[in-house]
Amino acid sequence: MKMVIRGNMATAVGAKLCRPNVVPAYPITPSTLFPEKMSEFVADGELDAEFITVESEHTAMSACIGASVTGARTCTATASQGLALMHEMLFIAAGMRLPIVMAIGNRALSAPINIWADHQDTISERDTGWLQFYAENNQESLDLMIMAFRISEDKRVLLPSMVGLDAFVLTHTFEAVDVPDQGDVDKFLPPYKPNHGTLDPSNPITMGAFVTPEHYMEFRYAIELAMNESRDVIDEVFEEYKKTFGREYKKLVPYDLEDAEIILITMGSISGTARVALEEMRKRHGKKVGLIKLTVLRPFPEKELLELTKNAKLVAVIERDISLGFGGAVFGEIAAKYVNKPDRPLITNYIVGLGGRDVTLKDFNEIVEKAEAALAAGEVEKQTEWINIKEDAL
């Protein structure tokens, strides 16, 4: 069935199709439509679930954890400061190996207060043990929600997942979305059956208990092993989703890489703009520029990155976040994967679109010009550059 819906609605419809048992929620712009729609689905009898209104985002994640340890399938949504308020609970959800799924309307962090798109909120939580997926459009927002449940609940993984979609650019923009049939989703995602103990008053157990240095490292190492294992699980689920619903997903999506000397790496909604810019560059100027869209940030797709960029002379990482005092966080992750690798490409970094600033074709043209200059010089003079900064406002 085709629906013309906003990105938030797409994540809500995707979540409803997965038949969650418990949905704790606290509203925050730009994700508020998710709990609104989930509450309507429950009230109208379209979804048999407990919808729990709570007093904060911290409590929303606490309620997700409490529900999940009883064996319930659970999900929620948040953004920006709300995700930051959940910070300590994100570690607990991952540490207790709970397959919670959360939609994130990617939004800038304060101060100053800003409600528009960038990736700083989820980027700041990349070390919590959650799998991270990033949508380019509303169709991906829906599909990634469904696949996130399947991946997280796999017994080889048992880690929570967050699906990021850019604030307003996706969350509030209407697009045509193909909504899968409920029966097909039920076959793709069977009911959640925990393969470990759950909280039950008739059979009391302790979960998330105090642990001494004698054992703590092994708990953390187990999460790392699960993260590593999830790479194969993601590939398997992506492939099965393609066979079932006809839409293909990859951790890293290549575009025009065959002869590319310069490869741009993007994440989220700016990837579509980047493709249009590259098409014009190739058609009008014959520039050998390619693109990689990053769909999965955690676990980081190192093998795919190295394979796709093996013939590149320069890799330009373009991102909507900043690790202040260092550069772009995604740039740091990508650059680290080339350590001790022979014949590695030059790597440059460009910060764009913070706080919802438009990322335009002009910006991509400027980035490619800078990348070409670095390639011609054989060195990178300035590792990280900010694009479209109003210098006279500083």
Image: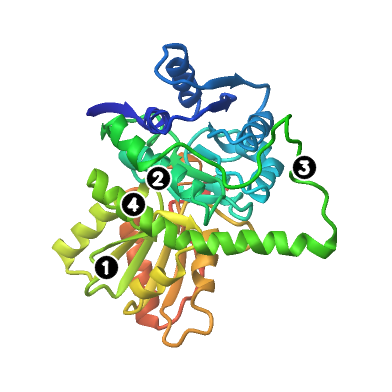
Q: Name which of mark 3 and mark 4 comes first in the sequence.
A: 3
Near mark 2 (Cα within 10 A), the count class, few <14, some 14-19 or many ≥20, is many
Q: Earlier in the sequence, mark 3 or mark 1?
A: 3
Badge 2 element: helix
Task: Give the residue type at disc 1.
Answer: Val
Residue type highlighted by circle 2: Met
Residue pushed farthest top?
44
Residue 339, x across and y down, in percent: 53, 80
Residues tagged 3 and 4 counted as in contact (Cβ below 8 A): no
Q: CA distance from mark 3 to mark 2?
A: 30 Å
Q: Which residue is mark 4?
A: 271
Quadrant hosting residue 314: bottom left
**Residue 235 in the image, given as x and y percentages of width and height:** 38, 59
Query: Which residue is tagged 1?
Result: 289
Depth check, mark 3 against mark 4: the one in front is 3
Looking at the rendered image, the disc whose residue lies closer to the viewer, 2 or 4, is 2
The span from disc 3 to disc 4 (Cα, nearest Å) is: 45 Å
Q: Nearer the viewer, mark 3 or mark 1?
A: 3
Label 2, label 1: how many angstroms apart (C-alpha)? 31 Å
Q: Which residue is mark 2?
A: 147
Q: Residues within 10 Å of mark 3 (few under 14, many from 20)?
A: few
Question: Along the horizontal axis of the image, is 145 left or right of 276?
Answer: right
* Residue receiving disc 3: 206
Q: Is residue 174 above or below residue 147?
A: above
